[in-house]
Amino acid sequence: MSVPDHQKDDHKIARADGSDVIGSVQSLLGTIVIAVFVITFIVQAFQIPSPSMENTLLIGDYLLVNKLCYGSGGVGDYLMPYRRIRRGDIVVFHYPVNPAQHFVKRVIGVPGDRVRLVNKQVFVNGVALKEPYAHFSRPANDLFRDDFPRLDVAPGETPEWWVLLRKLVEDGQLIVPQGHYFVMGDNRDDSYDSRYWGFVPQTNIIGRPLLIYWSVRGAEGELIAPSSVGDKLYHFAYAVTHIFQITRWNRTLRVVN
């Protein structure tokens, strides 16, 4: 018994529609897998919530961070073109005191370096660093912050660092141990950094900022860290409807260095 031509066409259309749906699902899944892979292994988005890196990074800057820049410390590091962490690099890392938090600072001392500050000037291995990125907003009146290391107790200093600091100071200089880094914010007078809580282990370092992909004006500061789901929805809606007003266009798509 033969099937009428119009019924054959109906079957063909049904099969084609089913194939298109499967193809769309496969394409979507492939996109999701690629996105998850990229976010997990290659780049990750972060936002700047504090002024500690002014004027290099501002509150409201949204960053893409290269997670493959430095490698992971495993065997693969010898096979891939990773590079070492250098003095002057800006790095994103897990805060050693609370690894759930992410910090961004600039590397001042690498393993083996001898670090000291004299009246805000940083010396590494006896040589004054040239730091055009350093920002100062207050007079030199905080001895612990501006003349470092000091062995007296400082406000904000963690107890663990207070103990360790005394073991690593020699001739008034702090010796950076192997596998660790001494970091500071570019906003030297308003940065909670290695001076107060110690070194960053290499294993804590996530990567290096590549790009400011978006930047929000400081006047809309409440957009930066909404505290509840309702706040997030409200601020998301506000950002979408006011994107041209709140965007710092002169900072968007700026390379970080």
Image (cartoon, rainbow, N blue to C red):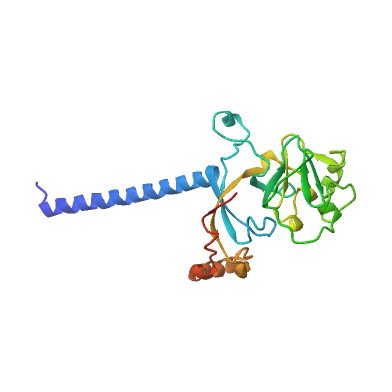
Q: Residue at the spot x=76%, y=34% of the render?
A: 112
Q: Residue at the spot x=57%, y=31% of the render?
A: 76
Taking depth in this image into account, of 34 and 29 the one nearest to the observer is: 34
Q: Is residue 249 above or below residue 6?
A: below
Q: Residue at the spot x=54%, y=42% of the render?
A: 41
The number of numbered badges drawn on the structure is 0
Image coordinates of residue 162 in percent, x first then y, are: 85, 46
Image coordinates of residue 47 in percent, x first then y, are: 60, 57
Q: Is residue 117 above or below residue 62?
A: above
Q: Is residue 77 above or below residue 66?
A: above
Compared across the picture, whether 100 is left or right of 176 comes to left
Q: Is residue 127 above or below residue 76?
A: below
Image coordinates of residue 101 in percent, x first then y, are: 68, 52
Taking depth in this image into account, of 93 and 229 the one nearest to the observer is: 93
Taking depth in this image into account, of 45 and 25 the one nearest to the observer is: 45
Q: Residue furthest right?
A: 152
Taking depth in this image into account, of 185 and 96 the one nearest to the observer is: 185
Compared across the picture, whether 249 is left or right of 148 comes to left
Image coordinates of residue 54 in percent, x first then y, are: 67, 58
